[in-house]
Image: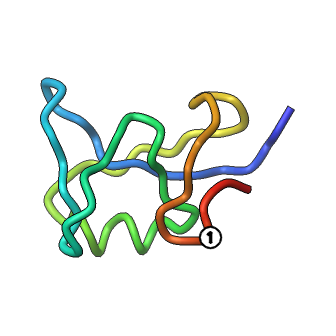
Amino acid sequence: MNEDVYYQPDFKNDETLITPDGVELWSYYVYANFDNARKDFPDRQIIAYKGDDIENPYFIDGDGNY
């Protein structure tokens, strides 16, 4: 099991979230770095996930899948 911690802004009411760069976040899009998530979504709660909490997470602030 993967024990890495990763982050995602809270999807309140299943809203569509779009980064300042115009990337639409899907449910499996995550950030490897908390500060990057906070920078893109300063008014949202940032939730930490670990391991397999999100199936096949895709890191948008890195080179994709780890």
Quarter of the image with the N terminus in it: top right
Above or below, 61 against 4 in this view is: below
Residue found at x 81% / y 40%: 2
Of 26 and 9, nearer the camera is 26
Determine the residue positioned at 74% across, 50% down.
4
Vertical placement of residue 3 versus 12, above or below: below
For mark 1, give the secondary structure. Answer: loop
- Determine whether, in the image, residue 39 is placed left or right of residue 3: left
**Residue count near mark 1 (Cα–Cα under 10 Å), binned few <14, some 14–19, many ≥20:** few
How many numbered circles does the render carry?
1
Dividing the picture into quadrants, the one containing residue 12 is top left
Q: Report the amino acid beneath label 1.
A: Asp
Residue at image coords 59%, 42%? 57
Seen from the viewer's position, the closer of residues 36 and 64 is 64
The residue at which mark 1 appears reads as 63
Point out residue 43 in the picture as x, y percentages from the top left corner: 14, 59
Give percent across and percent down for residue 51.
72, 36
